[in-house]
Image: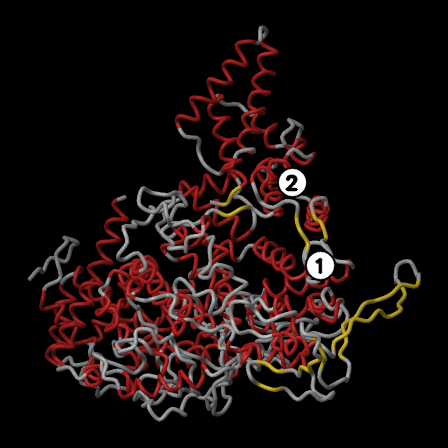
């Protein structure tokens, strides 16, 4: 309660020229930034499906976003701007991991990025539909999914933990994910029809 | 295989789904990757499906990481009660992460990336056993005996620090041996008690500190990858962290509560009912007619959630919650103006900047100085009379949800709170005094006095008399922890620390309960200010889950509000249906939340709503301070100070309908419903349009909804009767105006207006 506040009065290099006493980042920018985090993550994940890699790229992207804060034009689309930065970071990441066997092709990445950008506005409504759909899962299914998505877990570790054959766990997870995505699609179709 | 690149709807093939599954579970082969590419690139629908699938997977990953995680507490997350030397940089809606974690932050490279990296670091924290997303299980509501004392969080625990700790630690150890069907016990902390174990009745045990319990195996988690060297803290968390899980859990639990009964929930409230309610709940007044019209036209399926966000950012939210909490803390009359003003200033800032609730409470409990220096002192300054017994009682009641004033004189009839506990709590205020210092009024130059809250260096026990006339000594003691009674120890600072750290999150729990009750019309206990073993919560799993998540969010009040407002329960109408007539706390039944419960308007809400209804033209607003002052003065006529030991006051406006109507026959209303220039009524009368349109507009202004066809017919008939009696055209106009005035009056005088439904 009485710690000195950590001033973000930083040494932001891009502000070095400014004659104004360094202050914190523009609160609006911060707000835009924090609100965009999830969709940035999803955008990156669609191109680099490994969650840990996607996080790493997200962090790199965030670094650049903050460095280039001043280049953002208020009033324009924050997600379009930050997605562009993410695209570059994805490319840099792929360069570093050239020898990764399970890579997607450049063509795939480009196409996916394009389509993902176009799809940005559907995200929120899908998320809201997901809340409803999660509520509809059977208790056991819901528990399974919740366990699966705990940080650091995946189907394999889950199977070990539960003492179940791993293929059976994969089957269950697949069934549940398909059910969720169907449910979300149906919901949105129903809403659109209203 | 559909090679058509256009948008002809085609279902995703089993093959595509299999490939996607393999991708999500990181077991995809090189060949499969190529195949996946081929399919996705050849068919637009497959591409979309791919994106949707990844988005689903990613959302689940993200939200679990957010919701189940604890991030280092930002150093700047403190309550600013005095003007800061530096500006506070974080936006008001920045949620502050809670517990301090011993994360190693190596280096402090690009400082400009402070916020960014701190946020992303939050994605993975290997130091933490993430159990909250797993551990809070949807328990089978129907099968649980809500009255089982073990299930109930003993709110009293922290006052007495009794043996519940030992008992529950025993449960935790026992769980390790129990083979649950998920085989989970070994790797879970004691939190998951009751799930799949043989003991459905065991409530959530108190957590032993992480690492102490040998039964707990640390979940194997990869090291933080991508944990870049960063400068620390000042993190702002992404909004809606964990919302997906939290809200759906609550929804599911409430549904489970109806199992076994015949109850069907009431349907979703229609837009006007919901809009009016959320305005009153969040900003303390009804929506303006323009807002109503716009909301009705809006086709966006997310409009309710967006409205909540919008209202949370509205300055009126700050005003409303400041008013509520000022009244809660010091009532509507304060002996000195500066006490009230100071406290309001403090609260206004706390709500505007969305300071962590625990910081707000800590400040209110431990503040020192004059109200000008630190507005939070206003709270205790108002209650230090009678040896600080009101301060003791109100602190406990309001922040902890625990009634202890009864034990001032005798042991509590229903639970084991003893007289000692009251005085032990009271002794924390023993060093505190209210002093009047001589001062000079800067404006008039006259000698006056300034009130201040000071701490004296005194120590030792306080003495109290039992009913049998025996003198006893009470030392400062909280939740079983004895505090050094010496004069050098600042007792209130200790108390504020103990309340947060040592009360099993009771501060959070009480706030969750209170907030839920604010929106839904009933809390999880019969009274939100009397929690304890004698008052078992109706939905313990929901209460615990929300409490946990609230704590993890850093006691982010706006986030809590968003969760509550996003639940299914809050979307429902307040009307009964044929099956849920018994779901009515007003008649003493425990709430099932199959509908929203009707609430009375507070005096302030009524005043503000009348202003909106009758002067719907917002641009003609007087300065805020004038409005506040006028409203305050108007309400004073109804306040009666009862002069009790607890500094109680009564508002002769008790929220009942006859009362409200009585108030409405005051000058305020008659002026407003007059046809004077500047009133809404005047505006509607003068503008062109058919009479049915005028009726409609008055209805929207007063009741925030369209009139029903039946109402419209009846009202038009009424108007016709009035006007046909008038002979000449001129008198007909007057008759119409008078008729519409009566219509407006009738709307404002209805039950529907004065209630929040």
Tell me residue B278's x, y (percent).
48, 50
Q: Is residue B216 above or below residue B403?
A: below
Question: In the image, is B203 to the left or to the right of B110?
Answer: left
Q: Give B308 or A126, whichever is nearer the viewer.
A: B308
Tell me if mark 1 has few (under 14), some (14-19) or many (20+) residues whose alpha carbon lies within 10 angstroms of its own: few
Quadrant containing the N terminus of chain B in the rendered view:
bottom left
Label 2 to label 1: alpha-carbon separation? 42 Å
Q: Residue at x 70, y 72 (%)?
A: B82
Return the residue at label 1: B644
Q: How many marks?
A: 2
* Residue placed under numbered mark 2 in the picture: B620
- Side of B699 where B615 appears, left or right: right
Q: Residues within 10 Å of mark 2 (few under 14, many from 20)?
A: few
Which of the pair B482/B78 is nearer the observer?
A: B482
Residue B500 appears in the picture as rendered: yes
**Quadrant of residue B38 in the image?**
bottom left
Counting residues from the start of the chain, the first of labels 2 and 1 encountered is 2
Seen at 41% across and 84% down, the residue is B167
Image check: A123 left or right of B631?
left
Q: How is the image coloured?
A: secondary structure
Q: Residue B300 or B376: which is nearer the viewer?
A: B376
Residue B160, position as x, y percentages in the image: 54, 79
In this view of the protein, can residue A120 be seen by the observer? no
Q: What percent of the width, then of the height, locates residue B258? A: 30, 56
In the rendered image, residue B356, in percent from the top left (x then y), is placed at 55, 71
Callout 2: SS: helix
Picture quadrant of residue B649: bottom right
Label 1 resides on the chain identified as B
């Amino acid at each position: 309660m009485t710690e000195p506040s950590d001033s973000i009065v930083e040494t932001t290099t891009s502000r070095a020229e400014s004659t104004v006493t360094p202050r914190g980042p523009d609160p609006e920018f911060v707000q835009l930034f924090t609100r965009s985090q999830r969709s940035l993550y999803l955008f990156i994940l669609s191109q680099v499906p490994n969650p840990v890699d996607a996080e790493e790229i997200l962090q790199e992207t965030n670094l650049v976003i903050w460095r280039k804060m001043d280049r953002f034009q208020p009033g324009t689309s924050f997600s379009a701007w930050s997605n562009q930065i993410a695209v570059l970071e994805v490319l840099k990441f792929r360069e570093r991991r050239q020898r990764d066997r399970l890579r997607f092709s450049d063509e795939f990445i480009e196409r996916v990025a394009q389509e993902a950008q176009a799809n940005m506005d559907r995200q929120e409504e899908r998320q809201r539909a997901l809340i409803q759909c999660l509520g509809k899962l059977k208790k056991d299914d819901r528990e399974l999914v919740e366990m699966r998505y705990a940080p650091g877990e995946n189907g394999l570790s889950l199977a070990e933990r539960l003492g179940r054959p791993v293929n059976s766990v994969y089957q269950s997870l697949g069934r549940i994910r398909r059910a969720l995505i169907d449910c979300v699609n149906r919901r949105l179709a129903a809403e659109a029809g209203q | 295989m559909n090679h058509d690149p256009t948008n002809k709807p085609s279902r995703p093939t089993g093959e595509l789904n299999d490939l996607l599954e393999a991708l999500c579970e990181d077991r995809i082969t090189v060949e499969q990757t190529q195949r996946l590419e081929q399919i996705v690139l050849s068919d637009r629908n497959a591409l979309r499906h791919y994106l949707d699938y990844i988005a689903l997977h990613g959302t689940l990953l993200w939200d679990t990481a957010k919701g189940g995680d604890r991030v280092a507490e930002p150093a700047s997350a403190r309550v600013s009660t005095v003007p800061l030397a530096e500006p506070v940089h974080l936006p008001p809606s920045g949620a502050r992460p809670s517990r301090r974690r011993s994360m190693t932050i190596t280096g402090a490279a690009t400082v400009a990336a402070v916020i960014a990296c701190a946020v992303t670091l939050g994605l993975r924290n290997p130091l933490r056993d993430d159990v909250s997303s797993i551990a809070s299980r949807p328990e089978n509501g129907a099968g649980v005996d809500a009255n089982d004392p073990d299930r109930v969080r003993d709110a009293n625990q922290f006052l007495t620090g009794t043996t519940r700790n030992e008992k529950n630690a025993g449960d935790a150890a026992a769980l390790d041996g129990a083979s649950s069907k998920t085989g989970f016990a070994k790797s879970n902390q004691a939190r998951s008690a009751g799930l799949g174990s043989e003991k459905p009745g065991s409530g959530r045990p108190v957590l032993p500190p992480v690492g102490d319990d040998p039964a707990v195996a640390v979940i194997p988690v990869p090291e933080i990858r991508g944990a870049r060297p960063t400068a620390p803290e000042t993190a702002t968390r992404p909004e809606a962290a964990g919302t997906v899980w939290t809200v759906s859990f609550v929804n599911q639990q409430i549904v489970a509560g109806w199992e076994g009964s015949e109850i069907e929930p009431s349907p979703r409230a229609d837009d006007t009912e919901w809009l009016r309610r959320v305005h009153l709940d969040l900003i303390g007044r009804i929506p303006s007619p323009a807002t109503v019209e716009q909301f009705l036209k809006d086709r966006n399926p997310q409009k309710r959630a967006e409205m909540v966000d919008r209202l949370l950012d509205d300055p009126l939210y700050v005003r409303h919650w400041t008013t509520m909490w000022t009244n809660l803390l010091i009532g509507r009359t304060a002996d000195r103006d500066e006490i009230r003003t100071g406290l309001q200033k403090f609260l206004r800032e706390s709500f505007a900047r969305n300071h962590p609730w625990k910081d707000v409470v800590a400040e209110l409990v431990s503040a020192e100085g004059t109200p000008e220096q630190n507005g939070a002192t206003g709270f205790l300054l108002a209650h230090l009379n009678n040896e600080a017994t009101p301060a003791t009682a109100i602190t406990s009641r309001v922040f902890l949800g625990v009634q202890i004033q009864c034990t001032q004189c005798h042991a509590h009839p229903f639970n084991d709170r003893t007289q000692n506990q009251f005085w032990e709590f009271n002794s924390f205020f023993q060093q505190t005094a209210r002093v009047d210092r001589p001062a000079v009024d800067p404006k008039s130059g006259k000698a006056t006095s300034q009130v201040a809250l000071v701490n004296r260096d005194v120590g030792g026990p306080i003495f109290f008399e039992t009913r049998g006339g025996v003198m006893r000594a009470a030392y400062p003691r909280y939740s079983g922890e004895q505090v050094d009674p010496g004069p050098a120890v600042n007792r209130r600072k200790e108390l504020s620390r103990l309340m947060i750290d040592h009360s099993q999150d009771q501060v959070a729990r009480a706030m969750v309960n209170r907030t839920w009750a604010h929106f839904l019309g009933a809390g999880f206990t019969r009274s939100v200010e009397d929690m304890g073993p004698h008052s078992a919560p109706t939905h313990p799993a929901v209460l615990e889950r929300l409490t946990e998540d609230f704590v993890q969010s850093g006691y982010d009040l706006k986030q809590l509000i968003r969760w509550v407002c996003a639940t299914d329960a809050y979307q429902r109408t307040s009307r009964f249906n044929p099956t849920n007539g018994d779901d009515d706390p007003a008649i003493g039944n425990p709430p099932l939340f199959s509908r929203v419960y009707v609430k009375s308007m507070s005096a302030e809400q009524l005043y503000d709503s009348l202003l909106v209804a009758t002067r719907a033209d917002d641009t003609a607003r007087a300065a805020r301070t004038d409005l506040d002052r006028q409203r305050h003065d108007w309400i004073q006529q109804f306040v009666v100070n009862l002069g009790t030991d607890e500094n109680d006051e009564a508002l002769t406006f008790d929220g009942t309908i006859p009362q409200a109507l009585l108030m409405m026959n005051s000058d305020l209303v008659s002026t407003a419903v007059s046809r004077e220039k500047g009133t809404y009524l005047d505006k509607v009368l003068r503008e062109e349009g058919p009479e049915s349109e005028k009726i409609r507009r008055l209805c929207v202004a007063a009741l925030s909804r369209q009139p029903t066809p039946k109402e419209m017919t009846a009202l038009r008939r009424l108007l016709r009767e009035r006007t046909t009696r008038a002979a000449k055209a001129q008198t007909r106009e007057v008759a119409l105006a008078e008729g519409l005035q009566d219509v407006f009056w009738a709307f404002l005088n209805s039950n529907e207006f004065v209630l929040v439904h």
